[in-house]
Amino acid sequence: MRFGKIGMAAAAAASLVSAPVLAQAVQPVSSVARTSATVENENNMEGSSGIIIALLAAAAVIGGIIIAADGSDDTPTSP
């Protein structure tokens, strides 16, 4: 390999490793504390997606069992 390719690979690896560290070390521009806004008429939909995910997972498992237990004769023709 040429030294240029090795150098470029090392620079790319160093930038990938150091980017999260440098992004975390940056200080905010202002020291004003953030506060949340008040919410009126919220919809209380916190737990409803868990049921949908469970139903989709159960359907995927049942579909996988049906496909795996299919009684088709798919034996190879070569010896």
Image (spheres, helix red, strand yellow):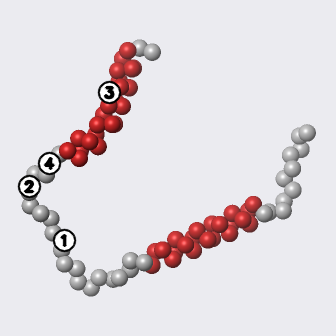
Q: Earlier in the sequence, mark 2 or mark 3?
A: 3
Q: Nearer the viewer, residue 18 or 66?
A: 18
What residue sits 8% from the left and 57% below the top? 31
Distance CA(mark 4)–CA(mark 2)? 9 Å
Element at badge 3? Answer: helix
Q: Earlier in the sequence, mark 3 or mark 1?
A: 3
What quarter of the picture does the N terminus occupy?
Answer: top left
Q: Which residue is mark 4?
A: 27
Q: Which mark is residue 11?
A: 3
Q: Position of residue 6 (x, y in %)?
A: 39, 20
Distance CA(mark 3)–CA(mark 1)? 41 Å
Distance CA(mark 3)–CA(mark 4)? 25 Å
Location of residue 61 (image quadrant) = bottom right
Distance CA(mark 2)–CA(mark 1)? 17 Å
Q: Residues within 10 Å of mark 2 (few under 14, many from 20)?
A: few
Residue type at numbered disc 3: Ala
Q: Position of residue 4 (x, y in %)?
A: 36, 17
Q: Position of residue 77 (x, y in %)?
A: 89, 44
Image position of 77 with respect to 57: above or below? above
Q: Position of residue 15 (x, y in %)?
A: 30, 34
